[in-house]
Image (cartoon, coloured by chain):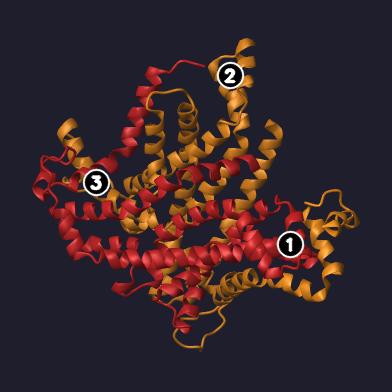
Amino acid sequence: MTRRRPLLSVVVIGLACLVGMPLYYILVNTFKTQEEMVSSPLAPPTSFYLDNYLEVFDRIPLAQSFGNTLYVTVGAVVVQLLVGATAAYGMILRATLFNRIFGALLLLAFVVPGQATLIPLYRTLVDAELVDTLNGLIFMYAGGSIFCFFLIQGYIRTLPFEIIEAARIDGAGVFQIFWRIVLPLIRPILITVGIFQTMWVWNDFILPNVFISSPEKRTIVLEVYSAVGQFTTDWPAFMTLSVIVLVPMVVFFVLTQRHIISGLLAGGVKG
Amino acid sequence: MTVATEAPPPSGSGTATRPRAAGRRTGPSGGWREAAAHQLFLVPVAAVFIVLFVIPLGQTFYWSLTDFTGYSDDFAFVGLENYRTILSDPSMTAGLTFTLLFAVGTTVLTTVIAIPLAVALNQRLYGRNLARSLFFFPAIPSMAVLGLVWGYILSPLGSGVLNSVLDSTLGLGPVPWLSDSTLAKFSVIMVGVWGGAGWHAVLYLAYLQSIPHEYYEVATIDGASGRQRFFHITLPLLMPAMVISQFLLMTNGLKVFDLPYTLTNGGPGFATQTITQSIIVSGVGQGQYGIASALAVLFTIAVAALAFSQLLISRRIERRVL
């Protein structure tokens, strides 16, 4: 169609490099000694120096906090998707007046910020002895189910209902239909919603910061935050920790990029 | 199978795919047993809604009118005393103003940057995919970790990266990026914009790509300039994207906590303290449940009012433009 525009390309790439600068900065400094970092913070590393990585792996229980984060993320996202999917399906099976009013009430959960319910829920978790536990975090993240419900409901409405009707006539039970037919049919939206919820739970800082106090139960973001004090004088080590923590999210992003873009586009079609 | 194909007409609706029609049908044919089983599907979400939203929200509202400290069940009803305390406490009002400033600042700046960026990224460029990835990147990792990294970059000492670069290239003395209260506010907002602009540009890009190319061709034939095409085709057709993008920016801006907390920890003084931080510090930290709850109630009202008025305004603009 049109020609490529060299001048605009230079400007855009220049700006992109400026935006990517912090990433470059933390990455190159993980291969430097402290003296080298202070004297030339932005220069490429002069040697393949790996001591920072060894030191961080030695001092920070990364495997443990990684495992904690994985447990909480998988648990929370599975709960959110299951509750959201059952609700969306139930709402379509029984669209009674009562249920429709209830569905509208659920919109309130969007307006209410998490901060407004934090203090009472903290008390509840203390009473239930769930404070400072990973399951307590999953309990808190279950609130995200309502967001999942709305997105899944939008998708489930477009499904051909004859399939479900046919299964019913063939004698399949209500829950069997849900497991064997509905869930596989709504897989695309489950993947999209699951990706966005995974990024939220994995990256979340506020809930672990408020609810977790034992060092061995820290999630990975909380581990980085706690390590700042330890590394105030050792910047390259801190940069190294940041890079190690970024890796899983970047890999996740590369693997799911297609779905993220299509998720944004899906919003575009709806708007 | 014959029953299945005959089933749709009695439902009264033309298409069998209409969920509402299907819902009505299960009643008479399935009996109450199946209806009860279907209703069971709504139990988990109802439980989540009641346990995680309705009950705590009620407690927050109730506690906001008491002097509850969390330690003893012996507390008194104090009316609006807590609200009065908040509005006369400088640390609380500082949190209120900075949160508003952050929300409005990031919403305006991100929009002003993201739309031209999306238009540029929609052109045929060299290295376009690389540029898109770089701009989108800050949205991937945790904002808390990025806040810590930026803390090193903007460190007010001469050893801070930005300061040492400024010193070696321009010979400027150390700039107190995070230790001067005005500059600290500015820095937090700039990092917030850095973190969100690329994400929102990709959102706009998705909408831009759905604008039919013929519109531009016809406008060009009719002699419209590049500026005219932008203001009369692109911008009006981006209206739905702007509604979504600004709604997200505004609500997320009001709820912000991670970034100021990790970048400046609310400082210097209370300059970059957010409402969320005040709620957590006074509620969980100091056990002032009454005060924290009153703050949470005020905050909820503010978020709801802003979200509602923003939707109303954007509806009105949308109707006028399209």
The residue drawn where x is 51% and y is 47% is: B249
The three-letter code of the residue at mark 3 reads Ile
Quadrant in which the N terminus of chain B is drawn: bottom right
| A70 vs B247, nearest the viewer | A70
The image quarter in which residue B300 lies: bottom right
The reply to whether residue B89 is in sight is: no
The reply to whether residue A97 is in sight is: yes
Determine the chain carrying the residue at label 2.
B
Residue of label 2: B228
Q: Position of residue B38 (x, y in %)?
A: 73, 70
Residue of label 1: A167
Do marks 2 and 1 share a chain?
Answer: no
**Image disc number at residue A26:** 3
CA distance separating discs 2 and 3: 43 Å
Q: Nearer the viewer, mark 1 or mark 3?
A: 1
| Secondary structure of residue under mark 1 | helix
The three-letter code of the residue at mark 2 reads Gln
| B92 vs A109, nearest the viewer | A109
Do marks 1 and 3 share a chain?
Answer: yes
Do marks 2 and 3 share a chain?
Answer: no
Q: Position of residue B195 (x, y in %)?
A: 40, 45
The colour one sees for chain A in the rendered image is: red
Which one is earlier in the sequence, the residue at label 1 or at label 3?
A: 3
Q: Is disc 1 in contact with disc 3, using a CB cutoff of under 8 Å?
A: no
The residue drawn where x is 62% and y is 62% is: A85
The residue drawn where x is 53% and y is 69% is: A117
Q: Check the image and report above or below for A133 versus B143.
A: below
The three-letter code of the residue at mark 1 reads Ala
The image quarter in which residue A137 lies: bottom left
CA distance separating discs 2 and 1: 57 Å
Chain letter, colour orange: B
